[in-house]
Image: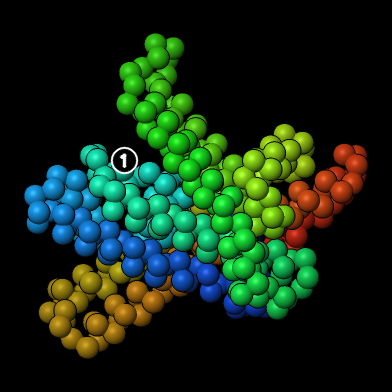
Amino acid sequence: MFESLGRGWKMIKASIRMGFEDKRLLLPSIMTVFVNFFFGLLLYADGSKLMTSGSQAGQHIASSTRHLIRHMDPNQLMHLSNGGGINGFMEQSGLSAMASNVDGPLCWSAAFLVAVWWLVNRFLEGVTTAMVYSHLTEGPGSGKFKLAAKAVLDSAPALICLGIATFLANTFAKWLKGKQNTGMGFGLGFLAGMVQIFWTLAGHLLLPAIVIEGCGFFAALKRADKIATGNLLTIGFGEVGIDKVAQFVMFLMGAVGIGIFGYAYVSGLLASIAFIGAMFLWFCAVVFTTAAFMYIRSAFYTCLYVWAIEAEAVTEMERRKVAPPAPLAAALA
């Protein structure tokens, strides 16, 4: 565990150094944070409007989104922004997560909002992937937002297929969770978790295949399967504990925010300029930290994919001699 955390911390520092070499690499992730706030508010407004008309679906949507907003701390922000780990709200496996959270039927408008929300997240993640790939293979400054966005837009049909497959996988996992125990010592909920974890990890290989190599959805599936089963990677996804470090840092950010609020409340400074300024700075720090971890996770999976491509070009005996990209090499040192 501690070895994994150490590797995660090294990967984070190396990715930040890479980001300082070209600060544009962070731009898509920062945009994602604000896009998620925007879609979250849209979903809340949509549910509130339906609720006033007596719609049961609207009540479910509004109450669920209101719960997210009222109880949002930095850890929730991490989940709202890009999953914050496996099976998060807008993660690769999380397209129908809102449907699971509201415990009721979604109206078509809300379902459309969630689908578009997911696609926008994947679009911006794809832009990050393309820019990091250019940075790693062509050098600092080579990753251009416009060119990366064009590459992702050209792959829109494959991304839509990825979204449909993700929805089906998550729906199947939800169906498994609703079933009774198998009688074999574990519940179907265990299998549901395995489906979601598998699809999350597969999705992080599919996206680079779609964006970097321009593969269609089924071709990307074949590429991901070849990478996963062809011994092209000598480490597992869990061996670099980025998510655990991110969760700890965001927990500290939450503690700082609670501390600021608690001190202002006890001191009667809630209406003071100092408190408003401190909370604004804290909010900016949360946004930047959240965006940074989203970028770092994308950089990690892109590094893995680049490493797999380079390993594929040599014989199996020579693969262990293939050096991983610099950020990943620093994590494994």
Residue 219 visible to the viewer: yes
Q: Which quarter shows the N terminus?
A: top right
Q: Left of 236 or right of it: where is 284?
A: left
Give above or below for 22 relative to 62: below
Give above or below for 98 relative to 22: above
Q: Residue visible at 76% across and 48% down?
A: 308
Q: Label 1 crowding class (10 Å Cα cut-off): few <14, some 14-19, many 20+?
A: some
**Count of marks, rendered view:** 1
Q: Left of 93 or right of it: where is 1?
A: right
Q: Residue visible at 23% across and 39% down?
A: 104
Q: Residue visible at 44% across and 54% down?
A: 118
Residue 240 visible to the viewer: no
Residue 99 place in picture, x, y as percent: 31, 43
Residue 301 place in picture, x, y as percent: 63, 54
Q: Secondary structure at mark 1?
A: helix
Nearer the observer, 206 or 269: 206
Q: Residue visible at 72% across and 68% down?
A: 134
Q: Amino acid at mark 1?
A: Ser
The residue tagged 1 is: 100
Q: Report which quarter residue 24 is drawn in.
A: bottom right
